[in-house]
Amino acid sequence: MLGNYLKIAVKVLLRRKFFTFISLFGISVSLLVLLVTAALLDHVFAPHAPEVRSDRTLGMYMISMQGPHASGNSQPGYGFLDRWVRPMAGMAEVETVSIFRGAQRRLSYVDGRRIESYLKQTDGEFWRVYSFDFLEGGPFLPDDEKNARAVAVINETTRQRFFGGAPAVGRGLTVDGQRFRVVGVVKDVPFLRFLSFSDIWVPTSTSRSQAYRTDWRGDFQAVLLARDRSGFPAIKRELAARLRQAEKQMPERDLFDHIYGGADTLFEATARALLSDGMRETHPEKLLALMLTGMAFFLLLPTLNLVNINLSRILERSSEIGVRKAFGASSGALIGQLVIENVVLTLIGGAIGLVLAAAVLAGINASGLVPYAQFALNFRIFLQGLGIALFFGLLSGIYPAWRMSKLRPVQALQGRPM
Amino acid sequence: MIRHALRLIWNRKRSNALILMEIFLSFLVVFVVATLGIFYWDNYRRPLGYDYRDVWGLEVDLRGEAEKGAGFQESEIFERLLREIGSLAPVEAVGAGFSVPYENSTQTESSDESGRLLTYEVNPVTEGIGGVLKIETVRGRWFEPGDAALAWIPVVIDEDLAHAWFGSADPVGRTFRKATANAKERRVIGVVRDFRRSGELSATSNYLLELWRPTAREATLRNILIRLRPGTPAAFEQELLTRLRGVARDADFEVRTLAQRREESFRSRLVPLVIGLVVAAFLLLMVGLGLVGVLWQNLIRRTREVGLRRAAGASRAGVRGQILIEQLLISTLGIALAMILALQLPLFGVTRFVSPEVLAAGLLAAALTIYLLTTVCALYPSWMASRLPPAEALRYE
């Protein structure tokens, strides 16, 4: 039965090529847009090297300080994180805690050539939270950070720029007037992995100024690597309790008396920054609902378009339907057949969309718009795309099929539908 | 004629309702993208209030240098840096400010002294900024070297803020206080051209420049701006940094030209617009092709009706006109529905960000686009219909 339906579906598609083209064009372009969006979101939120353990990582990325007359959102400062978040490494649920600064642009000159690189200041634990692919050497250790040793891990591109691609471990590197010894070389990290991204990683204690050690607001972030996801609630509760304690000892008590923030997954942190007032709470389910609504709204126009085309296409086949009805086919069978035809069509369109999306992503990667971009489709996105295509196909197929199944056989055989 | 066309549309209301919905949604898509584009274009053609060309920005952090304990305060080191930069040959002018053009961060204040709540951006600057950014004073005067010793804080406001606060009255000499406790009195000494710090693509905003004095909490300004002689090579950057290191070896410096910042700011605003344009164009193309297909199919099913009209003496042009008018009427209905929805936008406070003129232009552009699209899509099917030989059309069974 199904085999027959598929055979008929292909025949019908080949019969009216203009309609088939219009349908496929609409389906594939709509899915292309959704797939590229999905790939970008997947790139940011799903575990990818070096952030492979992001499914059991919580972070404190932004805080909000509030008082009766003033409020300010910013990244936390090192002084605050070191005193209130670092000790959470002692919890049974926590494997390790790392505190690091956002990557900053720094200039270097090699033989009169100007080189612009990103420099990230981290601690030794950073290399346990994230798993980098080392091409040479290895990470620096917590001990190096404690003793402010001028050591650096660099990426492949930096090795190329400074040393022409020759082995770099043990060699010296001058960045913005500061000299470092290279201890490791890692593969390039994409720019949008913004927690781990940089060109050069050095111990935080090598900063020219040590003033950061007492800051409560600044440009630092902390991540907590949990032993297991089941430890998340305990970690979140502990951090909330610590924030209440910290409020009593704030350095700018004349301005602020409350600190808001939390231990969040990346998605929770995004929801907190986008949707909550003053970072008080996070509602990831609201963000997800918003994204799904956006997707549904985007799909509305392509769906209507497809419904319209399907209606025209099916009405054209009224004599065929009339014959089948006259010989006793039930409405259900007819609806099933027409919906299957439409699903076949959307799946073909989906496949074209998938190929187009791969091409567009490769184009973005090659364009250099995003440094070290490695956008790609993977099995997860493929499944999402398949789901969307099926949903789309069912949605746009059911109404025309229902209309068709209501045809009266006599009229249909006359070729005078409706 | 139109009433007759309306009846024909009503007779086929189910399939026309779907087309109507499609037009309604397409209109909304075009409206959003067009309004954003017109908003940027409208902003772009307005005066900027300063000159970004040949200006370099230098972000400084002097805390490392001050910690060395060589006996210098941050503010002293800062003064020496400014003097050192001013003495370099390619430098025409140097100044400093809390924030710089095209940067994202802002510092705003609000005041209700004018009777209603006004919000404005505040930027503490040194006197030199006027020369660096070529800010034009239209009333009163710009800061002068002696101003630092005044008992009150001199401020300069831009035309926007002057108009919003004081109307057509002369703002020079007016005084007011910051909302926080025991703040010093501020006095307006001049008005400058409308200053749009966020760049050409942003809407006009209220802006206040205040003469900066070092305080315990903020001993230095974060940004130094340097105007260079035109044609200064990029390689000057290395010389500049070497000289700065001579004054403050353990400070952090980051050089970025305003032209670079401008490009980044443009990109961050235009990339979403371009993506929106491309997606909207594809959606419209899809809708257009779909419309051609549906109209064509509809006409095949109306062959006998067309044949009858032709046999009864209707001209080809008459048949073409009928199809076109029907399509235009459906478009008008869809556009009218969407317009009713879009006109509710001011209720949600959208006009605070986008002026009513820009919204109106967006509506107009969207309406024209949809009319153009639907007319073009109806042309070929209507031509096909008018070419049907009447005899054959009538015979069709």
Image (spheres, rainbow, N blue to C red):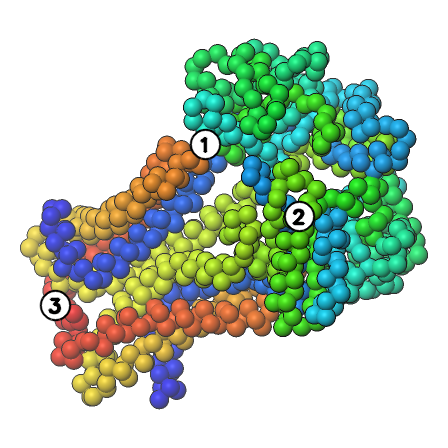
Q: What separation in Å lies between label 1 and label 3 (alpha carbons)?
A: 58 Å
Q: Nearer the viewer, residue B143 or B234?
A: B143
- Amino acid at pointer 2: Lys
Q: Label 3 belongs to which residue?
A: B395
> What label sits on residue A413 in the rendered view?
none
Quarter of the rendering occupied by the C terminus of chain B: bottom left
Q: Residues within 10 Å of mark 1 (few under 14, many from 20)?
A: some
Q: Label 2 belongs to which residue?
A: A248
Q: Chain of mark 2?
A: A
The residue positioned 77% from the left and 44% from the top of the image is A214
Q: Are marks 1 and 3 in contact (CB under 8 Å)?
A: no
Q: Chain of mark 3?
A: B
Q: What separation in Å lies between label 1 and label 2 (alpha carbons)?
A: 50 Å
> What label sits on residue B42 in the rendered view?
1
* Residue A413, picture quadrant: bottom left
Q: Earlier in the sequence, mark 1 or mark 3?
A: 1
Q: Are marks 1 and 2 in contact (CB under 8 Å)?
A: no
Q: Do marks 1 and 2 share a subunit? A: no
* Residue A231, picture quadrant: bottom right
